[in-house]
Image: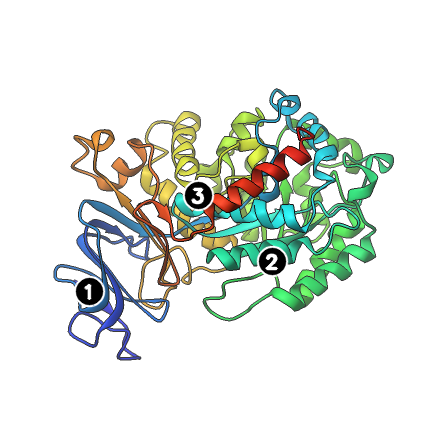
Amino acid sequence: MSDASSGDPRASGPDRAVHDLVVANARCVATVDDQRRELHGGWVAITDGLVSGVGDGEAPAARERLDATDCLVTPGLVNTHHHLYQNLTRAYPPMTDKPLFGWLQSLYPLWRSIDTESVYTSAWVGLAELALSGCTTSTDHLYVHPRGAGDLLTAEIDAARDLGIRFHPTRGSMSLSEKDGGLPPDDVVADDDEILAACEEAVARHHDRSFGAMTRVALAPCSPFSVTEDLMVRTAELAERLDVRLHTHFAENAEDDEFSLATFGCRPMEYLERTGWCTDRTWVAHCVMPNDDEVARLGAAGIGAAHCPSSNLILASGISPVVSLRAAGVKVGIGVDGSSSADSASMWLEARQAMLLAKLRDGASAGTARMALEMATIGGAGCLGREGEIGTLQVGAVADVAVWSLTGPSFAGAIADPIEAWLRCGPSAARDTIVAGRAIVRNGELVTDRLEEMLRLHAVLASKIQQLD
């Protein structure tokens, strides 16, 4: 059984012209297509950066062949929430025992010193870490913009381009400092007009609307407790005019709920609705605290939600009701979140945590590896507005692929179901990660000679920011 493109003869099935690359002999290809086909002994063909054939049995001819014997092949994973610069302050002792608000207040004084060099370096290292976990597309919520720090958004876009990962950064913002009743210090906030002008400039400079784009930009006020209500409203209006997506933190924990009730006189869901954010161009981060009625309203609006299980655990925020959210029609993706909260950026780990937490919250049958795989692929594509383009292995989709070895002691005995084995066993890292048909991880190693150089620089910058040098 195989699928083949009916157009360009270069993008065809096994009986047509030669492809650029074929990933062959997989124990299973989990396509995560509309039919959720699982192809045992499967193959994926790639031409010009797109999937040009998918099937099982004899693989087609190709200029390059990647043997996937004893491997699970999945779409590349999609990370829907992150703060890459935060890997400069991992495991920082003053914050390790704090819930959300205390955690933020412990770290803002350090983050106010980031600049283009530290943002480029932390983004490069953070995206490299993600690629090693099978991630091929990542967003980033960059909301700290200290005055005089330079063009931080361009710095992290440059890092993603240099590494070769597909990138969806957001132009984040904060406009309420401590003196205004917010949490951040004065020198990392800006006024609303300045923020909106910077957002529009970022979209004009970096946002690529073409199919298969490597860079797209969204607009992302940090959270209801760090921006004005007027900025929320005007950002939604700007996103509508520019036709880009919206992102923010939402209903992350009980403190978030209490702040909203005390400050706005309503729960976060009503605040989202009254500021014009309840649309299908919005995806929110965390979404831990919605009640049953709010879950239904989120689904009816077509909103996406980035589930960040490890961050929610380490900050004791709670367990997001992802089973109910998915059933209601919310497009639920997975996010590794900022490295200082989760202290790890593995999409495999987050997918496994999502599976386990769904079991814990809703029963053993509720959380499965296939559910988690869908969240980490097509759920993420839904959050980013790229369904049918990323997060799936079907003809015409971008050729973003992850190859997972199912061998060694940790997989011994896991014979019957390679997809369940992928998450129930492990821990796992991707053997190969392919973006737009090009390997950025091969045999478990990054395809670059810059890793040691970047890690050395990262150590210097992290020590400086943590005032340990």
**Residue 6 image offset from top left, x and y in percent:** 27, 77
**Residue 393 image offset from top left, x and y in percent:** 32, 58
Determine whether the residue tagged by mark 2 lies in a helix, strand or loop. loop
Residue 245, labelled with which disc?
A: 2
Local crowd at mark 3 within 10 Å, few (<14), some, or many (≥20)?
few
The residue labelled by disc 1 is 2
The residue labelled by disc 3 is 327
Which quarter of the rendered picture does the N terminus lie within?
bottom left
Residue 364 falls in which quadrant of the image?
Answer: top left
Task: Name the front one of labels 1 and 3.
Answer: 1
Q: Which residue lies furthest to the right in this view?
A: 179
Q: In this view, does 47 lie above or below 382?
A: below
> In the drawing, does residue 330 fall left or right of residue 101?
left
N-term-proximal mark, 1 vs 3: 1
Give the CA separation, mark 1 to mark 3: 31 Å
Local crowd at mark 2 within 10 Å, few (<14), some, or many (≥20)?
many
